[in-house]
Image (spheres, rainbow, N blue to C red):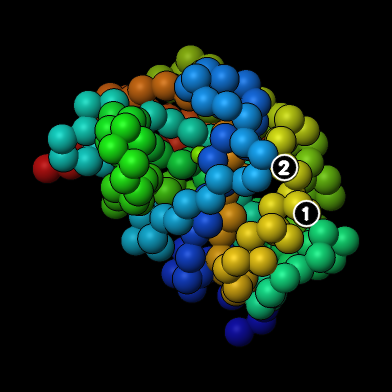
C-alpha cells in the first residue's frame, strides 16, 4: 500500500493517540489551571476513535461531557528523540479531532490524584475528520479552529496561540514515546470548552479545509 493511502487509514492502522493538555493559555485559565512549564501528556486508546456517521456517546454516570476541538497531527514514520528542526519530516498529515472529556470524571480524578484514563479515553472520546495530507497545510501553526454546538459558536481559536509549538511537541513526545506511522498527536484545545447533552449536534472545522458533524447520544 502506498504510504499516503495507508496513512489516510490512520483510524484503523494507528497504534496510539497521544494528547497534550493545557496547551493554550486561555483554556488553562478558563478551567482555573496554571500554565504548564512542560507539556502535559495523556493517552487515549485507539478504541476511542469514531468517524463521521457515528455518534458521540455520553459514558454511563457522566453528567458533564465537554467538547474540545483540536488539531491532530498524523505521524508518517517511526521516530525516536526527534530534534525540533527535523520534526516536520515526521508529519504525514493532519486531522481535525475532538478530545471529548468527561469533565466530572476528570475533576474527581484530579482531586484524588488518579489518572485521567476514564475521563479522556472512553469509547467515542476521539471523533476525527478524514485525513488531510501535509501538502494541504503549509503552515499548521496558523490555522483557525472552530466548533459549534447546535449551530452556536463555542470555540474559535488559532493554532498560533499554542504554548508549546508543533516541533517542540514532536521532539518532546518522541523523547518518551517512540512515534510510529499512523499515530495521532492531539495538540490541545483553545478556550471555549463547555458541556454537550444528548440530542446536541457538534460541528467543527479547520479553516475552510474540512468540517465534521457528530451527534451526541446517551450510551445505552
Ligand atoms: Mg484536550
Res 61 → quadrant: top left
Do labels 2 and 1 touch, CB within 8 Å? no
Residue 164, disc: 2
Residue 44, disc: none
Label 1 lies in ligand 1 vicinity (Cβ under 8 Å):
no
Residue 34 image position (x, y, % from top left): 57, 27
Among all residues in the image, which is located at the extreme right? Answer: 85
Circle 1 residues within 10 Å: few <14, some 14–19, many ≥20: some
Q: Residue at x 54, y 40 (%)?
A: 21
Which quadrant of the figure contains the N terminus? bottom right
Circle 2 residues within 10 Å: few <14, some 14–19, many ≥20: many
66 in relation to 85, above or below:
above
Q: Residue at x 62, y 36 (%)?
A: 36
Residue 167, disc: 1
Which quadrant of the figure contains the C terminus? top left
In this rendered view, identify the residue nearer to me: 72 or 148.
72
Residue 166 image position (x, y, % from top left): 74, 49
Residue 91 image position (x, y, % from top left): 72, 63
Tag 1's secondary structure? helix
* 173 relative position to 68: left or right: right
Number of marks drawn = 2
130 in relation to 38, above or below:
below
Among all residues in the image, which is located at the extreme top? Answer: 152
* 7 relative position to 99: left or right: right
Residue 147 image position (x, y, % from top left): 53, 27
In this rendered view, identify the residue nearer to me: 206 or 177.
177
In this rendered view, identify the residue nearer to me: 108 or 136.
108
Q: Residue at x 40, y 39 (%)?
A: 100
Tag 2's secondary structure? loop
Q: Residue at x 69, y 58 (%)?
A: 172
Res 133 → quadrant: bottom right
In this rendered view, identify the residue nearer to me: 82 or 4.
82
Amino acid at each position: 500500500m502506498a504510504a499516503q493511502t495507508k496513512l489516510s487509514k490512520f483510524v484503523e492502522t494507528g497504534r496510539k493517540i497521544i494528547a497534550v493538555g493545557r496547551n493554550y493559555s486561555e483554556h488553562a485559565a478558563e478551567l482555573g489551571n496554571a500554565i504548564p512549564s512542560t507539556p502535559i501528556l495523556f493517552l487515549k486508546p485507539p478504541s476511542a476513535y469514531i468517524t463521521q456517521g457515528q455518534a458521540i456517546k455520553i459514558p454511563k454516570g457522566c453528567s458533564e461531557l465537554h467538547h474540545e476541538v483540536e488539531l491532530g497531527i498524523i505521524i508518517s514514520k517511526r521516530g525516536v528523540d526527534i530534534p525540533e528542526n527535523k520534526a516536520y519530516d515526521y508529519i504525514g498529515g493532519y486531522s481535525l479531532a475532538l478530545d471529548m472529556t468527561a469533565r466530572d470524571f476528570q475533576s474527581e480524578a484530579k482531586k484524588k490524584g488518579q489518572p485521567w484514563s476514564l475521563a479522556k479515553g472512553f469509547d467515542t472520546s476521539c471523533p476525527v475528520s478524514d485525513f488531510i495530507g501535509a501538502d494541504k497545510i503549509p503552515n499548521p501553526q496558523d490555522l483557525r479552529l472552530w466548533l459549534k454546538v447546535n449551530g452556536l459558536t463555542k470555540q474559535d481559536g488559532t493554532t498560533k496561540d499554542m504554548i508549546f509549538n508543533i516541533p517542540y511537541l514532536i521532539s518532546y513526545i518522541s523523547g518518551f514515546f517512540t512515534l510510529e506511522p499512523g499515530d495521532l498527536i492531539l495538540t490541545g484545545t483553545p478556550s471555549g470548552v463547555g458541556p454537550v447533552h444528548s440530542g446536541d449536534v457538534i460541528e467543527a472545522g479547520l479553516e475552510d479545509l474540512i468540517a465534521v458533524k457528530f451527534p451526541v447520544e446517551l450510551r445505552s
